[in-house]
Image: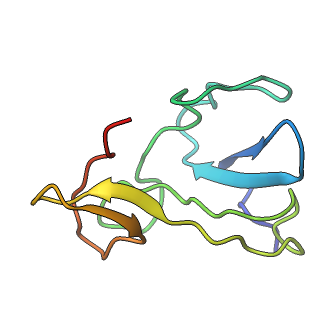
Amino acid sequence: MSYPPPSLHRAVTKAPTGPPVGAFVVGPRRPLPVAVGDRVGTGQALAECGNSGNSSEPHVHFPLRAGPDSEVARGLHFEWQYLDDERAEHTRVPKDGTYFTPPPA
């Protein structure tokens, strides 16, 4: 079975050098705001968060892979940099249910 299912959209990102590294899967309600070959910048919207399946809340699938083919590309590690409610800075994967903000630039 291919991923994502045909009813969903997928955006794959690629740095100027190196392999494609990210795939964002979004629901079928609207087309993606980017097209094949578009250059995207920091902070640019690539997808919308939605609730298109059997889930209790809107969510985004954010797998990182070392190639565009999710069937064979190896997964890449990712950690968030964020401030918690006490304004302490962290670099890790937050626990489920954690609310956080990006650290100042």
| Image: 79 above or below 82 | below
Task: Estimate the x, y position of residue 33 in percent, counting from the top left.
Answer: 62, 25
Task: Estimate the x, y position of residue 72 in percent, counting from the top left.
Answer: 90, 75
The reply to whether residue 7 is visible in this rendering is no
Q: Quadrant of residue 47?
A: top right
Front-lying residue, 60 or 55: 60
Q: 30 left or right of 81? A: right
Instruction: Give the residue displayed 55% in from the left and 60% down from the top.
Output: 61
| Image: 53 above or below 47 | below
Instruction: Give the residue displayed 33% in from the left and 65% down from the top.
Output: 90
Instruction: Give the residue displayed 81% in from the left and 75% down from the top.
Output: 74
Front-lying residue, 60 or 96: 96
The colour scheme applied to this rendered structure is: rainbow
Instruction: Give the residue displayed 70% in from the left and 70% down from the top.
Output: 76
Task: Estimate the x, y position of residue 50 in percent, counting from the top left.
Answer: 42, 47
Q: How many marks?
A: 0
The reply to whether residue 64 is visible in this rendering is yes
Front-lying residue, 5 or 16: 16
Task: Estimate the x, y position of residue 43 in percent, counting from the top left.
Answer: 51, 30
| Image: 70 above or below 40 | below
Q: 20 left or right of 96? A: right
**Which quarter of the figure is the C terminus placed in?**
top left
Q: Give the farthest residue toward the left.
A: 86
Q: 13 left or right of 31? A: right
| Image: 1 above or below 85 | below
Q: Quadrant of residue 15?
A: top right
